[in-house]
Every structure is written in C-alpha cells, then in structure tokens.
Amino acid sequence: MSLKNDSFPSSAAFDAINSSLQSDDAERKDAVKRGSAIFAFTLKNKEGKEESWHIDLKESGFAGKGTAPEGKKADEFGKLVAGKTQAQRLFMSGKLKIKGDVMKATKMEPVLKKAQTKAKL
C-alpha cells in the first residue's frame, strides 16, 4: 500500500523510507534499535491542507499514515529527504518543529540518508 498522496508530492519519501526499511531485515532491526522512538510528521501543502505520516522505529520498523503533533512545509521535508538541506538548519530557522526529545530526532538521520537513494522528489 502506497503512502503517497498526490496533493503532497514529497509524501513519496515515506514510500522510499518504508522500502528502505523493509529491504534488509538486519538494517531494519538496527534502525529500530538506534531510533527507539516513533517519529511523526505533519506536512502542509501549498493549498494549506495538512496530512500526517509516521515512522515507527520503536517496534515495527514501518512507515505509515497517522497523526503528528507539529507541522512543517511539505517542500522543506522533500528537500530534507532528498539531501538538499540539513535537519539542523531547518530546525534552527524554524522550518522544522520538533516536539518531544530533540536528541531522539537526530536518530532519524541514518534512515533518511539511506532513503535518499530511493526517493525521487
């Protein structure tokens, strides 16, 4: 089942992340061990609509649709997953909001880097 929503072009990244996590069982288990959290994302498209996705690195190692506490612009998320910007830079400029443990959020970087080779945004 695809996680992509055509109204949110960068949502294709969640399919790439999910595919990356599922491609190698050992790497998925390692990502879960390192991440040990559920990461939720709410994206806002150009029309102002919002939709949410999550990446479960606490138990299952799957990406899916679901609610999230804070929003970020969909185009900024696409740049982040494509490797065109850094999460720290987005966070410091206020374009990326993190609710919860900021240090846990840094554990998403290896997962995003692996997905960069598969995401076509």
Image (cartoon, rainbow, N blue to C red):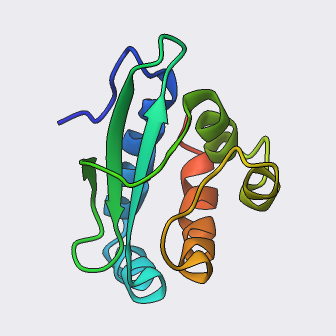
Of 115 and 48, which appears nearest the observer?
48
Q: What residue appears at the point 48 percent right and 10 percent down from the top-left corner?
A: 47
The answer to whether residue 13 is above or below residue 45 is: below
Left or right: 87 in relation to 58? right
The answer to whether residue 38 is above or below residue 119 is: below
Q: Is residue 121 visible?
A: no
From this viewpoint, which residue is outermost toward the top?
47
Left or right: 22 in relation to 103? left
Q: What residue appears at the point 62 percent right and 45 percent down from the top-left corner?
A: 81
Quick one: quadrant of the N terminus?
top left
Of 108 and 114, which appears nearest the observer?
108
Q: Is residue 42 visible?
A: yes
Image quadrant of residue 56? bottom left
- Measured as percent of width and height from the top left, residue 98 is found at 56, 62
- Measured as percent of width and height from the top left, residue 73 is found at 58, 33
The answer to whether residue 39 is above or below residue 83 is: below
- Measured as percent of width and height from the top left, residue 111 is found at 53, 64
